Image: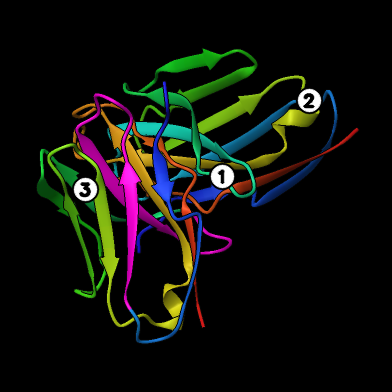
Amino acid sequence: GQQLNQSPQSMFIQEGEDVSMNCTSSSIFNTWLWYKQDPGEGPVLLIALYKAGELTSNGRLTAQFGITRKDSFLNISASIPSDVGIYFCAGQKIRGAQKLVFGQGTRLTINP
Amino acid sequence: DAGVTQSPTHLIKTRGQHVTLRCSPISGHKSVSWYQQVLGQGPQFIFQYYEKEERGRGNFPDRFSARQFPNYSSELNVNALLLGDSALYLCASSFSEGEQYFGPGTRLTVT
């Protein structure tokens, strides 16, 4: 099935460092979302973006909806141990149609 | 408030058997969607139900079916199980067209 191209696939960083990951698509999406998934649990919604160019923050997390509507990025500032997990981007082509298309995920590991 | 709940948590089945997975949405949410997440990949959309009607279907064979009940809970059924059906099955609920909130999933292993 279709998936978004998410990079990097994995990251190994030191505690306190900033993190950046992105997601690209060959087609347009009208909504972009970022989720975090811990082992054995379902994805948890972090940030939702609804307008091209929109920049939204949630605490130490900042995400942007690309102006072309074909990409999005997520930044995490001053990483802490609880940021460890897998981060997924997801796109929604038709607002209101619930089908989400997901990226392959970025696995974040933090060295204390 | 309780989040999305799913049962069972884990399930082991044999090839050829069928399975029923259950989902209870967040109170007040009328839309339920099902996703399959194979190890190492992102979730793949299977179905969406809203007000007991199918609103969307992903690229899955007819062995997969679902329904939604008057209380907005939902069941996902998979017939003639294959080894490749082994995955984490996620349910997500939303209020109408809003953001989707996921349950913890049901881990299905087919042997």
Q: CA distance from mark 1 to mark 2?
A: 20 Å
Which circle, 1 or 2, is nearer the viewer?
1
The numbered disc on residue A93 is none
Q: Secondary structure at mark 3?
A: strand
In this view, which residue lies farthest toward the bottom? B16
Bounds of the magenta segment: B18-42
Colour scheme: rainbow
**Share a chain, discs 1 and 2?**
yes
Identity, as a three-letter code, of the amino acid under mark 1: Glu
Res. A98 visible in picture: no
Q: Chain of mark 2?
A: A
Find disc 1 in the rendering and name its residue.
Answer: A41
Q: Secondary structure at mark 1?
A: loop
Identity, as a three-letter code, of the amino acid under mark 3: Gln
Which circle, 3 or 2, is nearer the viewer?
3
Q: Chain of mark 3?
A: B
From what the image shows, is residue B60 above or below residue A2? below
Please tell me in which quadrant of the rendered image residue A54 appears: top left
Find disc 3 in the rendering and name its residue.
Answer: B48
Q: Chain of mark 1?
A: A
Neighbours of disc 1 within 10 Å: few (<14), some (14-19), many (20+): some
Q: Is residue B70 left or right of residue B59?
A: left
Residue B98: where, in percent of width, then height?
A: 26, 26
Identity, as a three-letter code, of the amino acid under mark 2: Ile
Q: Is residue A62 left or right of residue A90?
A: right
Please tell me whether residue B29 belongs to the stretch shown in magenta. Answer: yes
Res. B2 visible in picture: yes
Please tell me whether residue B28 belongs to the stretch shown in magenta. Answer: yes
Closer to us: A85 or B15 = B15
Find disc 2 in the rendering and name its residue.
Answer: A80
